[in-house]
Amino acid sequence: MPDPTQQTARRRLMELAQDPAYRPFILGYLIEALDERYWPLLVQVALEHVEQLAELQEASRARVGELTTERFM
């Protein structure tokens, strides 16, 4: 069973990471704590994630266009 304290800390950290005022601190601290040998993998995963989001966004826009066209036909 997951530790409730860890769940609370994880949730709070994610909330702070979403806040523009705290994001630079959170990201900077995590990068400093991460061993440099993992940085290339982190960069690769981040780029792939953004690419997948862009593809998903484009597919969603195309689908909205299709639905709009179908609705007005």
Image (cartoon, rainbow, N blue to C red):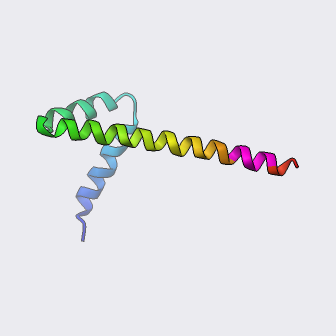
The residue furthest right is 73
The magenta region covers 64-69
Instruction: In this rendered view, identify the residue nearer to me: 9 or 57.
Output: 57
Residue occupying the point 20% across, 34% down: 31
The residue furthest bottom is 1
Residue 32, x across and y down, in percent: 15, 32
Magenta stretch, overall SS: helix
**Residue 13 in magenta?**
no
Instruction: In this rendered view, identify the residue nearer to me: 23 or 36.
Output: 36
Instruction: In this rendered view, identify the residue nearer to me: 8 or 24.
Output: 24
Residue occupying the point 37% across, 28% down: 21
Residue 19, x across and y down, in percent: 40, 34
Instruction: In this rendered view, identify the residue nearer to me: 64 or 31.
Output: 64
Residue occupying the point 28% across, 57% down: 7
Q: Taking the image as drawn, is residue 3 in sight?
A: yes
Residue occupying the point 43% across, 39% down: 51
**Residue 66 in magenta?**
yes
Is 31 situated above or below 62?
above
**Is residue 42 toward the left or the right of residue 68 in the image?**
left
Q: How many marks?
A: 0
**Is residue 48 toward the left or the right of residue 1 in the image?**
right
Q: Taking the image as drawn, is residue 35 in sight?
A: no
Residue 35, x across and y down, in percent: 11, 38
Residue 47: image quadrant is top left
Is 27 situated above or below 69?
above
Is 29 situated above or below 12?
above
Q: Quadrant of the N terminus?
A: bottom left
**Is residue 18 toward the left or the right of residue 39 in the image?**
right
